[in-house]
Image: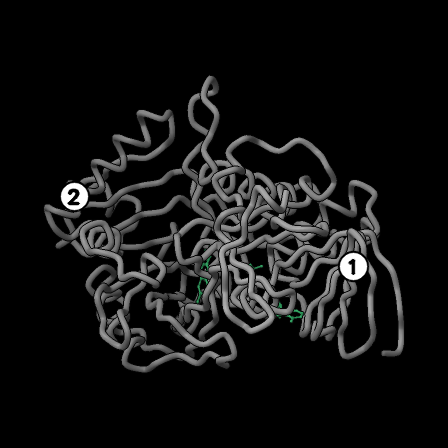
Amino acid sequence: MATVQGADVVIVGAGVVGAAAAWRLASLGADVALLDRAEVASGASGVNAGMVDAPGWGRPDEHPDLETTLKMGSWELYQRVHLEEGEPIGFRRSGSVAAIATEAEWELAKATVDAARARGQEAELLSSAELRSLEPEASPLLLGARWSPLAAQADPAEATRALARLAARAGARVLEGHAVVHLRPRGEGFVVATELGELHCGALVLAAGAWLGPLAHLLGVDVGVVAVRGQMWATAPLPPRLFSTFSAMESPLAWATAPIEAGTPPQLTHDGGVRRARHLYGRQNRTGEVIVGGDRQLAPADLVPTADPAGIAENRAQAVEVLPFLDGAPATRTWAGLMPFSLDGRPFLGRLPGPGRLFVAGGLASSGFNRGPMAGWLVADLVAGRPVPPCLSEAEPSGRVRERNPSGRVQERDQERNR
Ligand SMILES: Cc1cc2nc3c(=O)[nH]c(=O)nc-3n(C[C@H](O)[C@H](O)[C@H](O)COP(=O)(O)OP(=O)(O)OC[C@H]3O[C@@H](n4cnc5c(N)ncnc54)[C@H](O)[C@@H]3O)c2cc1C
């Protein structure tokens, strides 16, 4: 190993989560190194749809839950980056429509709107005519839509690079092309070995997205995060046709009523190779392309993801049902990425039990662009010993990770013993 350097904190993974954590820690005065095996935003953070849901903070006299805190905190951070930090990221408060095609979908949408309003959050049900007054291209056959007025969109790769630039400006070292190949404890801290040298650190943050599992294995820990392939397609650039982000209520209904297979994360479109739900989301981006996605299938973490043409065709058919003009707008490019899904559906945000200052920030699934900045920010506050909101306990890793013994077999970690 050539170089030996030191840092207070090493963060592995320069996606939206790691970059936000680096920005926060460097701003607090820590000596931070943000490592990525490739470039900033080379994982899911660079290829996602850029949709940012924002339900509203809710009643001021009630503590927001983790979902609200991550979404609204990130929404505020994106606005800060775009409006105050001199980093235009294409942030636009566009609102979001979720298309309703059946009575059962209407009932589910109504229940979620009622629940949101009871919490003091913002959501509405739109009739078919109201929907088309917002989105004239929506199919007249739809019954209406669930409308989220605060929802937004941003350019995902630009936003992630902006967070990393802000981290660098605050003093963090952003080290691209540094693949972590080995990790070992050293006192309270760790030695992080890459093919280019070693770094010693006082605290280590694992923020490697869909590769969190293999990375944690280097320290003998089994974190229940698996890779799920997401895929998208885009039309050629078109004149402005869509204003809000869009989705469909079909998959939330399917997932609300279908049982979850043991050992797989919730909210996948496929069970093995068999489709169990159609899923749809998208927006028109700043270049004019309409970008659309849907399928979520388990994949090996070492997969170089490419889109499955059959899934793209199915997704296109559903998109045309919701937005008929897309029938005349074929896919001109497709792409895929790996998302970090946790097996229990909850993120992993916190310190791992056991010796050493080892933290994990991940498992944000299909809404990590939406929730990632605040997730990274809160883990950074934990690392820095600052107060964090009580809702972070919803993502506590203790009791959810397992330790691998030297034979490679996995055993439950006793969180109390290791505290
Ligand atoms: C097609 C698609 C559409 C999506 N649409 C949306 C959306 O509209 N809204 C939304 O909120 N979310 C969306 N998501 C999900 C979102 O992109 C992810 O949840 C989020 O980007 C995860 O961020 P991350 O920082 O945890 O991981 P990543 O962005 O994947 O970053 C992890 C980084 O770790 C690095 N790394 C891994 N192993 C090592 C190692 N050994 N050494 C060094 N570096 C390493 C990788 O190179 C990578 O850059 C979508 C995802 C996909 C694939």
Task: State whether residue 356 appears in this view.
Answer: yes
For disc 1, the neighbor class at 10 Å (few under 14, some 14 to 19, many from 20) is many
Q: Nearer the viewer, residue 414 or 362?
A: 414
Alpha carbons under labels 1 and 2: distance apart: 48 Å
Secondary structure of the residue carrying numbered label 1: strand
Counting labels gives 2
- Please provide percent x and percent y for residue 147: 31, 41
Residue 106 has which mark? Answer: 2
- Asked which quadrant contains residue 204, the reply is bottom right
* 260, above or below 296, in the image: above
Secondary structure of the residue carrying numbered label 2: helix
Q: Nearer the viewer, residue 346 or 401?
A: 401
Q: Nearer the viewer, residue 220 or 384?
A: 220
Residue at the extreme left:
103
Q: Is mark 1 within 8 Å of ligand 1?
A: no
Q: Which amino acid lies under the numbered mark 1 shown in the image of this protein? A: Ala
Q: Which amino acid lies under the numbered mark 2 shown in the image of this protein? A: Trp
Q: Which residue is mark 1?
A: 33
Task: State whether residue 45 appears in this view.
Answer: no
Point out the quarter of the image occupied by ligand 1. Answer: bottom right
- Please provide percent x and percent y for residue 368: 50, 54
